[in-house]
Image (cartoon, rainbow, N blue to C red):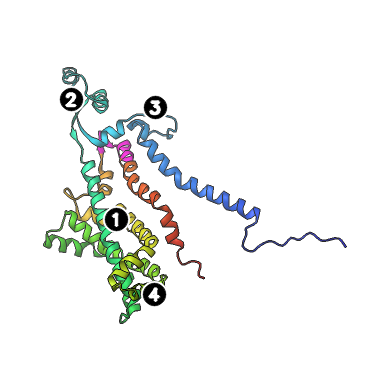
Amino acid sequence: MSQGISTAHSVVEPTARTRWVAGVLVVLYALVTIVPLVWIILTGFKTPPDSISYPPKVLFTPSIEGYCNLFTTRSRQTPEYIAALPPSTGACDQVARNASMVVAGPSNYIPRFVNSLIIAFGSTVLSVGFGVMAAYAFSRFKVPLKDDLLFFILSTRMMPPIAVAIPIYLMYRELGLSDTRLGMILLYSAVNVSLAVWLLNGFIDEIPREYEEAAMVDGYTRLQAFRKVVLPQATTGIVATAIFCLIFAWNEYAFAVLLTSGTAQTAPPFIPIIIGEGGQDWPAVAAGTTLFLIPILVFTILLRKHLLRGITFGAVRK
């Protein structure tokens, strides 16, 4: 008796056609996502005329004028004045002289970039720190009206920032926190702590209580069990939460525009107002955006394994 050819396939293992379609979709999505980033990076190496040319130039002569304009301020001088100057001391000085300008001093980009680093990482540490403690309390102790409190915490995230912008501005003006790093750190921490509590509560719920009970039977206190048992088990969740909190604080624009203007101004509201001769200096804007992407990109890549494990943590139950 001849055996028939079976057409059955595993419900778990995808078919070759499914893998091919999925691969095509992933490649297309990657291209759509990466093209704007590549265009921004390329624009940073264009000259101002090339950056606004129509049709857009794909092939062009690279120039560092955008990065020079980003890090320096320039003033226009007469050809006689420039000819009387000593030889240029650097590439940016020479670029400025070629445009009949001289470098007047450094720009404010680096201080704004440093402000972004301090405020974003400072608020992330605070929000994740408070979030993990609150999430542990909700997970391990009998909190009255626990579900209502968790929903209230989440509801603060649903409200658009513009709805509370004016009250926060008035409050900060009275407290002297306007245009201060401390004020921005506290504000971003308050906004992010709701997200941190909700994410970390789910991670800590997945950690068996028996681990802590065994540690306390061995003589550990509740705090020692939390520090030596729970925190190591919740590392993936903490890292995933920290990345999401950092991304929000790093990219936040509305509050930064309203509450900062000089001392504590971050890079997002500073980059769009980079003005060149005759209008917007698009190569400098693109250069500033490219440099602004690097820290968050490096941070996410370094912790990508924890991020992937954290997102899928608890998805498969035994």
Per the image, the residue denoted by label 4 is: 209
Label 2: how many Cα within 10 Å (few below 14, some 14–19, many 20+): few
Q: Name the residue under label 2.
A: 77
Which element carries disc 3, helix, strand or loop? Answer: loop
- Tell me how far mark 2 sits from mark 1, CA to CA: 41 Å
User: For numbered disc 2, what is the local secondary structure?
Assistant: loop
Tag 3 near tag 1, CB within 8 Å? no
Among the two numbered marks 4 and 3 on one chain, the one whose residue lies closer to the N terminus: 3
Which numbered disc flags the more N-terminal residue, 2 or 1?
2
Q: Which of the two discs, 3 and 2, labels the residue nearer the N terminus?
A: 3
Q: Give the range drawn in magenta.
A: 275-287
Q: Earlier in the sequence, mark 3 or mark 1?
A: 3
Instruction: Tell me the residue at 18%/22% (across/down).
Output: 78
Which residue sits at x=30%, y=82%?
Answer: 144
Which comes sooner in the sequence, label 4 or label 2? 2
For discs 4 and 3, the disc positioned in front in the rendered view: 4
Quarter of the image for residue 212 reads bottom left
Q: How far across and how far down the image is residue 214, in percent?
A: 37, 74
Is residue 155 visible in the rendered structure shown here? no
Residue 73 % position (x, y)? 20, 34
Circle 2: residue type: Gln
Tell me the quarter of the image containing the N terminus.
bottom right
